[in-house]
Image (cartoon, rainbow, N blue to C red):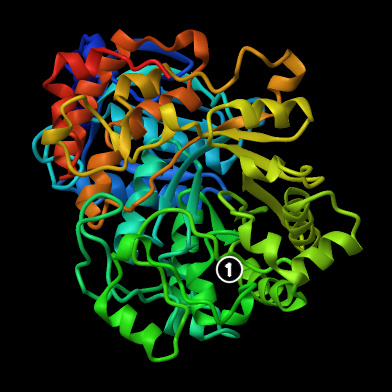
Amino acid sequence: MKISLALIISILFFACNNPNKDYQNATSDYQIIPKPESLEMQTGRFVVDSKTTVSAAAGLEHEGDYLADMLSLLTNATIDFESGTSGTIQLKIDDAIENEEGYEVSVTYDNIVISGKTSKGVFYGIQTLRQLIPVSSNSETQQTSDLTIPAVEIKDHPRFAYRGMHLDVARHMFPVAFIKKYIDLLAMHKMNTFHWHLTEDQGWRIEIKKYPKLTEIGSKRYGTIIGHHPGTGNDETEYSGFYTQEEVKDIVKYATERHVTVIPEIELPGHASAAIAAYPFLSCFPEEPTIVTKDMGSKAGKEAQANGTPKIVQETWGVFDDVFCAGDEQTFQFLEDVLAEVIPLFPSEYIHIGGDECPKSNWKRCPDCQKRIKDNNLADEHELQSYFIQRIEKYLNANGKKIIGWDEILEGGLAPNATVMSWRGEKGGIEAAKQHHDVIMTPGHSCYFDHYQTEDKDNEPLAIGGKTTVADVYAYEPVPNELSEEESSYVLGAQGNVWTEYMDTTDDVEYMILPRMTALSEVVWTQKEARNWDDFKLRLNTMKHRYDAMDLNYAKHVFESKKDTLQQTKP
């Protein structure tokens, strides 16, 4: 009896004198990006140690495993996950939360509760909890024996439903492991869409079993130009690679587990050189040789053409006249066959079909294309492009998918159910929203992460041109003033685009996206009135330490140059 009483007294004494219960936290303990809708600092800190357990309600088992694994990696302890509600960290579904991606985080000195309307909301709550963990030299990637989380009450939900990042793997391809790392970065920033640009003039990167030459021939180019377009020569080195369907399934599964939707892009009717090199019948003029800009082609490519292989995969960058023939039924059969294999690989409701930069010169001189125009009472080649896009849309709609296309799909008349991705400024997005079509904003002046990041281009890696600073990205407002309240509802969100003509390594990609991607994540998540550049910079300095802990190759000069960090470029 004396032992029991002593034990009770000891417990009461510890509870009353627990330093973690009365710990006074500072504003610097709550440097979260994107900024939550509501954050109330509290007194106390929760200690993660061997006594910590994670529990989750039914349907949240994956999120529970994810959190337990994450905390175990950050501590010297094994953090167990168990179903139910008995853990010191509890994951719950709360139907009272209105937004499908909304969440609440409650941290006290002895308990953490993360609630969401759905499992997606709970997952985002976990990402916020992750940023509440203090950043040290060994956090994020290595173990630490002293991990505490500041007490807080957070209520949060995103402003936009579409929060995306794009990656071009056709100009330069990246390993499966890096694609997963890229998806992890999206998830950490509460971005929910990965736009995967898989086909281009310079390479076809997805296995299509009915058309093996797409990867046997279309995934390989004989060489690549040296330097900035039009180039100073050719590296004379074959470049090749593609993702098997099994690899695609693995990546999609990985993304789905992190609540990231993967939208594939199959370019049409332009940017088709790689497909045409594999199957020349797709061209209006199969026997005409591929034109290499300013004689920058490789010796091997020239020899192939001289020896009776007129069509080759492009070795330079730009826009090319050789596009899919719109007058030949074989073209549409080919594209439907390709899409029939793509559709089952991607559970996304969308397929991106490109639709940009499609020259009309071949169509103007192609008898089959001119006959198509005449037979369908089309006014011109622009309406022929609209016919092309609408045929593909009908096929995809019939198979349970919707299309997204670059803003050129507005030319000649917009497909009935199409979503427009506005890249040539905002004009296309404004026009589409006024027509009551969904819009994703991705204008070059704010959302193209292949631009230079500073005025000091001589000390920057080679880029396509332009200048987009972190401040420019943060200042972007996705809803144009020209739209009414009703029209504004058609703006689904925004996306950062990563075109890889001049990014041939994973380090290059990381350098170009960080910290601009971090700035965009707040643009698309946080309410407009809550965004503040000076406040964001303070939180970004904490995020920088997280980049360091994760060994990411971010643009460090952003944190060193006041000029480039503070000034914004006018679009």
Determine the image quadrant of residue 458.
top left
Type of amino acid at the residue the image marks with label 1:
Leu
The image quadrant where one finds the C terminus is top left
Place residue 233 in its image quadrant.
Answer: bottom left
Left or right, 497 with respect to 397, comes to left
Res. 312 in view: yes
Residue in the image at 42% along x and 72% along y: 313
Tell me the residue at 58%/59% (across/down): 270
The residue shown at (21%, 73%) is 236
Seen as rendered, the residue at the extreme bottom is 307
- Furthest toward the left, the residue is 137
Q: Element at badge 1?
A: helix
What crowding class fits label 1: few (fewer than 14 Cα within 10 Å), some (14-19), or many (20 or more)? some
Look at mark 1 in the image and give the residue it sits on.
345
Q: Is residue 20 left or right of residue 177?
A: left
Could you tell me which quadrant the N terminus lies in? top left
Residue 51 seen in the current view: no
Closer to us: 273 or 233 = 233
479 above or below 85? above
Residue 101 sits above or below residue 157 on the image: below
Q: Give x and y (percent) for residue 512.
A: 27, 40
Residue 108 position within the rendered picture, expressed as x and y whole percent measured from the top left: 35, 21
Relative to the observer, which residue lies in front, 339 or 546?
339
Q: Between residues 7 and 473, which one lies in front from this camera angle?
A: 473
**Taking 406 as reference, is 24 left or right?**
left
Pick the residue in front: 245 or 385: 385
Q: Residue at x 50, y 50 (%)?
A: 195
x then y, percent, for residue 530? 46, 10
Residue 415 position in % (x across, y down): 78, 47
